[in-house]
């Protein structure tokens, strides 16, 4: 048999006392798409960062085409033909799309001047394969989904023989994802080997040839896709049966609670218009629609993160004056961004500081000094309540898995005792076990009296978790779905403008 293009043998990685990987093995054949699965914290991203030269292994060997190699840096990995598309977007926001795509090549060149016409022409040719994005635009002006496509396009500019895709579709629309799948199949036909990390079983079983499972930093198994089922993969990932992905919804007798939050005809005159709905006690209200439909803008308008020109926000029947996010927090309305890395948590800061950052006033003594003991106690309490898996409360958030980072982001919101939490893509890029925990937490919060609004692009999450769904199209509420009306087809029809449903109900 031909030598594998990549062989990992006995790789171990320590972060202080924490063992992220323990003697793991992995092989990648030439021209295959190989899925790597495991819960957040299983060691997938750690191994990929070792292969890509971002991290160095404590022990173990890496071979390319049978030859022992030491991958000392990302530049060294690229010179060996290894490209990595990170789960968390790592672009320069103030540079253009074209500049980001060819940054590695630009750093290597010796010419004193840049030929921007050639740069933009070459970048647009690559980007055209993925989406209609103007490569002259600044990355900072793009939505998250477009930034993810830029990350993928950047990897395609490299002369890769090994391409690592870490949750590449987490922020993409269905159309964008299908375009990516076509490119992956084309790359495979051209002999490029792909490591595909995803928690979406449908993608894995459609695209991949083999699947390897990690659990708790250890290798579990490798199987051909034809010899295994999605349920088998999930069981091996979590080491247990997951019998219920979503907690029970409200019963018929519970669905008529009082209105916690009432939104009346809010708009900004540009991105969203005449939006009205009510969030009732005990329910989880979903907001669906296509990416770019205005879902996030509506949430940001409610919370004062984006200005609005019309409408009223009422909390427990009382109109609120919300001109900035600090006004929303004081009123008891908090927002958890879809961009966990950019807006959800401070990766370099400690877990304790992240959890307490919105509640510093109550932790500060009369002379303005922060009570560190009180801060640690607050953080420990919420970390325990949300079952954050961590080594120490003073450890940086970047040391946590994606699912646990999301729990810290949620703990930060809970620390200010909110009345309403708006969550944008609450489980983007986290594994099935962590998703189940987050869903359970959200249902418990709803039952405790906190209003929960969930914006999600994942149809199973939207329909499985939420009691009602509002569908947004072109900045307006296209309709409301509840009970048996909540089907994937109904949501898609409303989102695409080919269906109708009852208007969103709201209290007078």
Image: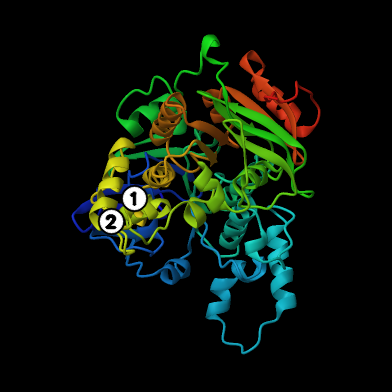
Q: Position of residue 3 (x, y in %)?
A: 38, 53
User: Which residue shows up at 81% across the image and 28% down it?
Assistant: 498
Left or right of 241? Residue 314 is right
**Where residue 400 is drawn, which disc sits there?**
1
Q: Where is residue 403 in the image (x, y as percent from the top left)?
A: 40, 42
User: Which residue shows up at 51% across the image and 47% down it?
Assistant: 329
Where 122 falls versus 222 (above or below)?
A: below
Taking depth in this image into account, of 278 and 384 the one nearest to the observer is 278
Q: Can residue 229 be seen in this view?
A: no
Taking depth in this image into account, of 250 and 16 the one nearest to the observer is 250
**Where residue 395 is drawn, which disc sits there?**
2
Q: Position of residue 457 (x, y in %)?
A: 60, 37
Q: How crowded is mark 1: few (under 14 residues within 10 Å), some or many (20 or more)?
A: many
**Where residue 83 is drawn, which disc sits there?**
none
Left or right of 171? Residue 244 is left
Tell which residue pokes out farthest to the left in this image: 17
Secondary structure of the residue carrying tag 1 is loop
Q: Position of residue 194 (x, y in %)?
A: 49, 50
Taking depth in this image into account, of 187 and 261 the one nearest to the observer is 261
Nearer to us: label 1 or label 2 = 2
Q: How crowded is mark 2: few (under 14 residues within 10 Å), some or many (20 or more)?
A: some
3D distance between C-alphas at marks 1 and 2: 9 Å
Tell which residue pokes out farthest to the front in this image: 366
Tell which residue pokes out farthest to the top in this image: 253
**Do the residues under discs 1 and 2 have CB atoms within 8 angstroms?**
yes
Name the quarter where the C terminus is drawn: top right
């Amino acid at each position: 048999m031909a030598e594998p293009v990549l062989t990992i043998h006995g790789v171990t990685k320590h972060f202080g006392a924490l063992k992220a990987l323990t003697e793991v093995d992995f092989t990648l054949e030439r021209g295959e798409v190989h899925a790597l699965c495991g819960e957040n914290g299983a060691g997938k991203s750690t191994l990929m960062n070792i292969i890509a030269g971002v991290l160095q292994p404590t022990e173990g060997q890496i071979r390319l085409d049978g030859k022992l190699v030491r991958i000392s840096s990302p530049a060294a990995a690229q010179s060996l033909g290894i490209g990595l598309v990170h789960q968390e977007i790592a672009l320069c926001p103030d540079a253009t799309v074209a500049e980001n795509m060819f940054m590695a090549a630009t750093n290597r060149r010796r010419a004193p001047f840049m030929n921007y016409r050639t740069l933009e022409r070459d970048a647009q040719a690559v980007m055209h394969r993925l989406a209609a994005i103007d490569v002259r635009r600044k990355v900072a002006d793009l939505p998250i989904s477009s930034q993810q496509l830029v990350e993928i396009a950047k990897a395609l500019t490299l002369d890769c023989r090994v391409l690592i895709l870490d949750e590449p579709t987490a922020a993409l629309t269905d159309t964008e994802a299908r375009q990516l799948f076509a490119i992956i199949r084309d790359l495979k036909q051209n002999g490029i080997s792909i490591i595909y990390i995803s928690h979406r079983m449908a993608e894995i079983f459609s695209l991949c040839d083999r699947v390897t499972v990690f659990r708790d930093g250890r290798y579990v198994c490798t199987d051909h896709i034809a010899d295994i089922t999605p349920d088998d993969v999930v069981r091996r990932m979590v080491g247990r049966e997951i019998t219920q992905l979503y907690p029970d919804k409200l019963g018929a007798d519970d669905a008529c609670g009082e209105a916690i939050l009432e939104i009346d005809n809010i708009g900004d005159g540009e991105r969203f218009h005449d939006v009205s709905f009510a969030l009732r006690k005990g329910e989880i209200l979903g907001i669906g629609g296509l990416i770019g439909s205005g879902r996030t803008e509506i949430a940001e308008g409610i919370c004062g993160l984006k200005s609005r020109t019309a409408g009223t926000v009422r909390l427990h029947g009382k109109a609120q004056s919300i001109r900035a996010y600090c006004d929303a927090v004081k009123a008891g309305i908090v927002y958890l961004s879809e961009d966990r890395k950019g807006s959800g948590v401070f990766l370099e800061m400690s877990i304790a500081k992240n959890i307490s950052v919105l509640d510093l006033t109550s932790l500060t003594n009369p002379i303005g000094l922060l009570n560190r003991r009180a801060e640690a106690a607050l953080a420990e309490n919420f970390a325990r309540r949300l079952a954050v898996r961590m080594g120490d409360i003073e450890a940086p958030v970047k040391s946590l898995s994606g699912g646990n980072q999301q729990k810290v982001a949620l703990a930060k919101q809970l620390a200010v005792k909110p009345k309403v939490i708006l969550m944008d893509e609450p489980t983007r890029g986290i594994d099935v076990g962590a998703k189940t925990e987050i869903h359970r937490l959200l249902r418990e919060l709803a039952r405790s009296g906190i209003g929960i609004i969930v914006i999600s692009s994942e149809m199973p999450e939207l329909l499985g978790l939420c009691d009602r769904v509002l569908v947004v199209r072109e900045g307006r509420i296209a309709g409301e779905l509840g009970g048996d009306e909540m089907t994937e087809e109904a949501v898609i029809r409303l989102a695409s403008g080919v269906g109708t449903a009852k208007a969103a109900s709201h209290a007078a």
